[in-house]
Amino acid sequence: MMKEQITEIFDIINDTEDFIKGGWRKEHEKITLKEKCVMPIGKVSTDSIEKLVSEINCCELCELCQRRNNPVPGAGALNPSVMFIGEGPGAEEDRTGIPFVGAAGQYLDKWLSAIHLDREKDCYIGNIIKCRPPGNRDPYPDEIAACKPFLIRQLTLLKPKMIITLGRFAAQFICNSQDGIGRLRGRVHYYEGIPVVPTYHPSAVLRNPEYRKPVWDDLKQARELLDDIESGR
Ligand code: SF4
């Protein structure tokens, strides 16, 4: 047998051994992660949404990084009228890296259309935490604490005219309150001077149809407020 053939056989055996031990997979994942983290050449180092997304893509600040398939940094217009803030990615979001694309996302699209907002042109959609909690459990306080600087930077960079929070965690975080969503919704709060309209999470409304009426009231309030802001009243 030729020397090259023997070397090739040993290479295959080594690769197989690595694969069985999980080494190939780990190495492959490392490369994929590294590729996601690289900033495009020639970009300036001041803060930007692009830089933020790159940091989120390689973030390992909490344990949620270990089981995610894709972080979900957020998506939408870079000068949005409204920033929607949910809780965290679900299974479909984790699979695609895009926020609100599952059943809750399709329902949210109907809400947007009802108040004449275009998802791409008028809105930026994000979450409190950027990686999926296993089994869609509630995020732990340490995970929210680790991830919150990303959201704060997003808000600083995007400067939305209005924030609509979806569900308890987002409302509590943005309104800096421990009250439940039932107490927080129904009035306008402020985050750094930006009006905040808290409402229920679309998933909760899909499970509890009695929330539909309060959500519609919140959306109408948000639309009226946005009309006032945009017309300078
Ligand atoms: S959830 Fe946030 S802090 Fe935790 S790993 Fe993902 S991006 Fe980092």
Image (cartoon, rainbow, N blue to C red):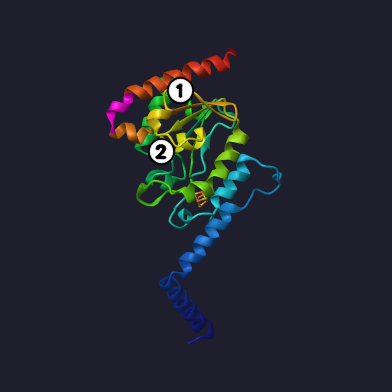
The answer, for residue 86, to whether it is visible in the render is: no
Amino acid marked by disc 1: Arg
Image coordinates for residue 23, horizontal then vertical, percent: 47, 70
Is residue 139 visible in the rendered image? The answer is: yes
Judging by the rendered image, the residue that carries numbered circle 1 is: 187
As for residue 111 lying within the magenta part, the answer is no
Q: Residue 156 has which mark?
A: none
* Label 2 residue SS: loop
Q: Main secondary structure of the magenta part?
A: helix
Position of residue 196 measured from the top left corner of the image (x, y, whole percent): 51, 27
58 up-or-down from 106: above or below: below
Say few, some or many: other residues with alpha carbon within 10 Å of mark 1 (under 14 / 14 to 19 / 20 or more). Answer: few
The C terminus, quarter of image: top right
Is disc 1 placed on a helix, strand or loop?
loop
Q: Earlier in the sequence, mark 1 or mark 2?
A: 2
Residue 101: assigned label: 2
Q: Residues within 10 Å of mark 2 (few under 14, many from 20)?
A: many
Residue nearest the viewer, comparing 58 with 169: 169
**Magenta region:** 208-212
Image coordinates for residue 104, horizontal then vertical, percent: 36, 35
* Residue drawn at (60%, 44%) of the image: 52
Mark 1 or mark 2: which is in front? Answer: 1
Q: Residue pushed farthest front?
A: 178
Residue 1 vertical placement versus 112 (above, below)? below
Residue located at (49% from left, 81% from top): 5
- The answer to whether the beta carbon of the residue marked 1 is less than 8 Å from any atom of ligand 1 is no
Q: Looking at the picture, which amino acid does disc 2 mark?
A: Val
